Image (cartoon, helix red, strand yellow):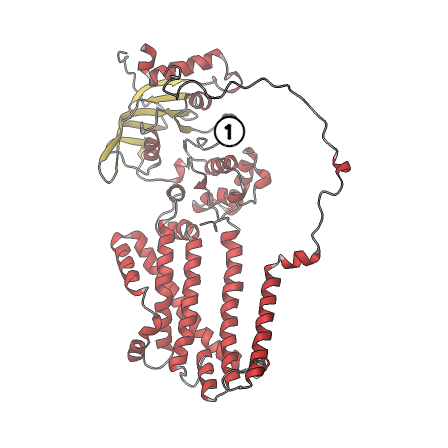
Amino acid sequence: MLQPDVNGPTGDGALLQVRGVTLQYRTPERRVTATYRVDFDIHPGERLVLLGPSGCGKSTLLKAIAGFIRPVEGSIHLRGAPVTRPGPDRMMVFQEFDQLLPWKTVRHNVTYPMRCNGVSAEEANQRAERVIESVNLSGFIDSYPHTLSGGMKQRVAIARAMAMRPQILLMDEPFAALDALTRRKMQEELVALWEAVGFTLIFVTHSIEEAVLVGSRVVVLSPHPGQVCAEINVDHLGGPNSSGEEFQNACRRIHDLLFPAAGEA
Amino acid sequence: MGSIDVKQAGGPRSVAPPVKRQDFTRKVVPVSEIGTIEVPLPWTQRMWNSSLVRRGLILLILAVVWEAYGRWLDNPLSFPTLSETLGSLWTDVANGTIPERLQVTLRILLMGYGLGILLAAVLTTLAVSTRFATDLLSTLTAMFNPMPAIALLPLALLWFGLGVPSLIFVIVHSVLWAVALNTHAGFLSVSNTLRMAGQTFGLRGLRFVTGILIPAAFPAILSGLKIGWAFAWRTLVAAELVFGVSAGQGGLGWYIFEKRNLLETSGVFAGLITVMIVGLFVEGVIFQTIERLTVRRWGMHGG
């Protein structure tokens, strides 16, 4: 397939700008380039999905946005300021269930980051109760994480991140370790939550269906090393009409972008 | 990918396709017609299931054997009976001798224990921040951890003289390495996800150590504290036995030594029982309670 005209991101009105970001990580034996000159923008209120096959560097990219990794080339700007280190304005939800602090109850897991950042105890508690209610865990507010199921732990992690009211919510395959039924439910809940509260989300996944269900816009990354090969609007294809033709078409289109050889064979 | 190649998959199937069987539904017997579903066990069995009862019984048997052997031997100088031992234990507890000695011992112990933990905290905090300090800590623990604290006593006497500072020196030595080693291992085993989560909260430096690393490594820290306590307690009693009295105030080890000199063997046994009871109390009550309130409640006791 010929490379179509690249209409790169313009940067107008963007909340986060990623420009020419090349990321590398080291193993004891070699230095690996994970992504190569990646550009994209995210605008306020978007649900941007970074989609790509395993090993395309999408998680590494998210960690760079979170500030855990420095790009070897290019820049990441949040509202014009360069991202240099992790911070509460980019709260992250991880894939692993052990991201909650096991020594704190659900309530205190949610209030703790707020308390670390100067939110008053009263305000933190109010916000925590509201946000825990919105992820349907009010009955477990004083439970310890080890008594919760995997799906519930992920909901707490989402609640914890949302309560901080970050500029951007980062999610690194948060539902990947869940069983299929729970995963589907959580995807729908996440979109419903977005509709109710409104936040800006960057969501990493390797599942095309999940990308189309959860996202409003999908950044398709090529296999290793990851480069942006397309950006596609998929808003309002998920939800109740997720089995509709449009949904299927979007999935097929993304599939063909990811696996061009399969279309020709 | 095409259909599976039958030959590669191991030739034609060796089991014939299943015969189609009939569906059916049937009625289950209502619970009320089955009769009793749960029956409490007889009280004798329930008692026997309690480890407290079983251990109590063992203690009772040991007590009877002791008493019987003591009476048969009839030599209070080498092996007093249980009743004689309990008698002198009671007398010395009642007249305040044992509580006073115990207090001396525990005060020194707590000072040494506290100082040891403080030094361990400083060492491990440094060790998580710089690589040089990590190497320093692992080298020092490798060198000093296998060294019995009591072996340092002659040196301590030379440096600090006969008295409390020498005792504290050996206790610090016995606590420091065990606690530092365990705490450091605990810090290293804190999961990367938890570390990253803490960093997104904006925690750095000392706040990161106290807010994330210490609680996350608490199971390891607690086991270090337990080992440190056990070392310190054994070391202190032994050290007191060796040079005991300081400024007219001896501890529990000195009490045992004194009783031997007076040939009051039942007093020696009473002292030993006190050592045992204190050890059991700290390990079985204090540390158990801390464990129940922390790592067990948090579901972190698996590892």
Considering the image in quadrants, where does the N terminus of chain B appear? top left
Q: Is residue B295 left or right of residue B123?
A: right
Q: Is residue A57 left or right of residue B62?
A: left
Q: Is residue B52 above or below residue B150?
A: above
Crowdedness near tag 1: few (<14), some (14–19) or many (≥20) residues, C-alpha within 10 Å: many
Q: Is residue A142 left or right of residue B149?
A: right
Q: Callout 1: helix, strand or loop? A: helix
Q: Is residue B291 above or below residue B163?
A: above
Residue that badge 1 annotates = A186
Residue reaching furthest to the left: A30
Residue A252 locus on image (x, y percent): 40, 14
Q: Is residue A217 above or below residue B239?
A: above
Q: Is residue A113 above or below residue B144?
A: above
Residue A92 locus on image (x, y percent): 41, 36
Considering depth in this image, is B231 or B43 the residue closer to the camera? B43
Quarter of the image where one finds residue B6: top left
Q: Is residue A101 left or right of residue A230?
A: right
Can residue B88 be seen in the rendering of this structure?
A: no
What's the residue type where badge 1 is placed? Answer: Met
Determine the residue positioned at 66% across, 59% down. B47
Residue A194 locus on image (x, y percent): 49, 27
Determine the residue positioned at 44% across, 54% down. B219
Residue A61 locus on image (x, y percent): 32, 31
Q: Chain of mark 1?
A: A
Determine the residue positioned at 48% across, 85% down. B259
